[in-house]
């Protein structure tokens, strides 16, 4: 009787959190590039500017919020995606159609994006704080301090400012990452079953990260702007103000986003596969057993 090993519901969050520890500085630079009013500083220049003004550790500003986000957002989206996929396959080694993977990824990502919105709000603010004038800095000491102060100073609903965008971005991100990764890995393994190696996972996750970057960038820019500022009346207002800067404004920071997201995606799925293989749940397959 054949066996497969499935994911535990929290593996996605752990894998994403591990990847975040290594890629957080890239995410911080991406946020800085997206929130500058004039696109006159590039990726390397922004990195040098952050370090020269605030020191090397400023690259890890907001790390507690970033980890909290992964342990809410990514735990939720991957738990829903893998739970639905396991329910559909019922422990059998069968391949689902790509469109079903897209539906499940979109559902998990949209719910995860909403759940992770408060931590994302604090994350963006803490990352952007280092480039603000001293008298305008919020100086959140950690993610819980940030959430508490936002509730006290701006109201509970402020934590979910931009939650609609976060849900939309979460859906696109999970479609780009999870469903594309699974589909690419499936195609590779179906053509060569002996190629289930680290290189296969890296290649599949690289392509998935690229897809996720291109899908998410416009929404990512709008979400970042809305979370960092309080002078937008809504998504439409934010989009119209961004459009005044030109169509490329919606893709501001695409290069650093790809530099950050592609390694993050690769690390996430490499960690995720190792967690599954070493600590996953063996499931007996009844494929072909009538």
Image (spheres, rainbow, N blue to C red):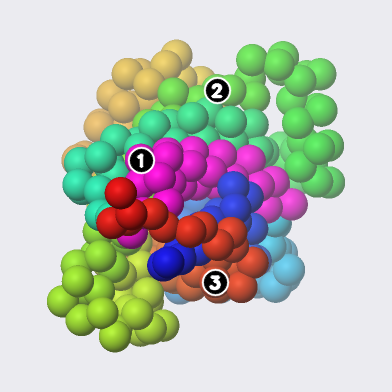
Residue 161: give x, y in percent of width and height.
55, 23
What residue is pinned by disc 1? 88
Depth check, mark 2 against mark 1: the one in front is 1
Depth check, mark 3 against mark 2: the one in front is 3
| Relative side of 117 to 247, left or right | right
Q: Which residue is found at the position 16% from the left and 76% from the top?
A: 191
Q: Is residue 144 magenta?
A: no
What residue is pinned by disc 2? 161
Q: Earlier in the sequence, mark 2 or mark 1?
A: 1
| Relative side of 220 to 176, left or right | right
SS class, disc 1: helix
Q: Which residue is found at the position 64% from the left and 67% from the top?
A: 279
Report, in whole angstroms, how far the alpha carbon at label 2 lies from the one at label 1.
34 Å
Residue, far front = 290
Residue 259: give x, y in percent of width and height.
40, 68
Indicate which disc residue 277 carries: 3
Q: Which residue is found at the position 38% from the left and 54% from the top?
A: 286
Name which quarter of the figure residue 145 lies in.
top right
Range shown magenta: 64-93
* Quarter placement of the N terminus: bottom left
Residue 11: give x, y in percent of width and height.
60, 56
Pointer 3 local density, CA inside 10 Å: few below 14, some 14–19, many at least 20: some
| Relative side of 9 to 285, left or right | right
SS class, disc 2: loop
Q: Which residue is found at the position 20% from the left and 41% from the top?
A: 99
Name which quarter of the figure residue 50 lies in.
bottom right
Q: Earlier in the sequence, mark 3 or mark 2?
A: 2
SS class, disc 3: helix
Depth check, mark 1 against mark 3: the one in front is 1
């Amino acid at each position: 009787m054949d066996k497969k090993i499935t994911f535990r519901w929290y593996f996605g969050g752990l894998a994403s959190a591990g990847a975040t520890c290594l890629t957080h500085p890239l995410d911080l630079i991406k946020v800085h590039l997206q929130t500058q009013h004039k696109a006159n500083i590039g990726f390397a220049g922004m990195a040098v500017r952050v370090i020269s003004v605030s020191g090397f550790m400023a690259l890890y500003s907001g790390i507690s919020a970033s980890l909290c986000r992964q342990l809410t957002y990514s735990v939720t989206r991957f738990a829903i995606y893998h739970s639905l996929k396991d329910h559909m396959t019922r422990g059998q080694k069968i391949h689902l159609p790509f469109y079903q993977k897209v539906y499940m990824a979109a559902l998990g990502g949209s719910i995860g994006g909403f759940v992770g919105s408060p931590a994302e709000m604090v994350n963006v603010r803490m990352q952007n704080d280092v480039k603000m004038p001293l008298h305008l800095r919020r100086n959140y000491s950690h993610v819980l301090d940030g959430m508490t102060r936002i509730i006290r100073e701006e109201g509970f609903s402020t934590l979910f400012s931009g939650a609609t965008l976060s849900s939309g971005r979460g859906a696109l991100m999970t479609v780009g990452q999870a469903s594309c990764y699974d589909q690419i890995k499936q195609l590779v393994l179906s053509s060569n079953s002996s190629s289930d190696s680290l290189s296969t996972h890296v290649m599949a996750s690289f392509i998935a990260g690229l897809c996720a970057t291109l899908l998410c960038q416009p929404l990512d820019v709008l979400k970042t702007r809305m979370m960092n500022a309080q002078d937008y009346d809504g998504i439409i207002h934010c989009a119209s103000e961004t459009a005044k800067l030109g169509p490329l404004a919606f893709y501001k920071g695409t290069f650093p986003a790809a530099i950050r997201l592609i390694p993050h995606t690769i690390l996430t799925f490499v960690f995720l596969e190792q967690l599954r293989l070493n600590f996953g749940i063996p499931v007996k397959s009844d494929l072909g057993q009538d």
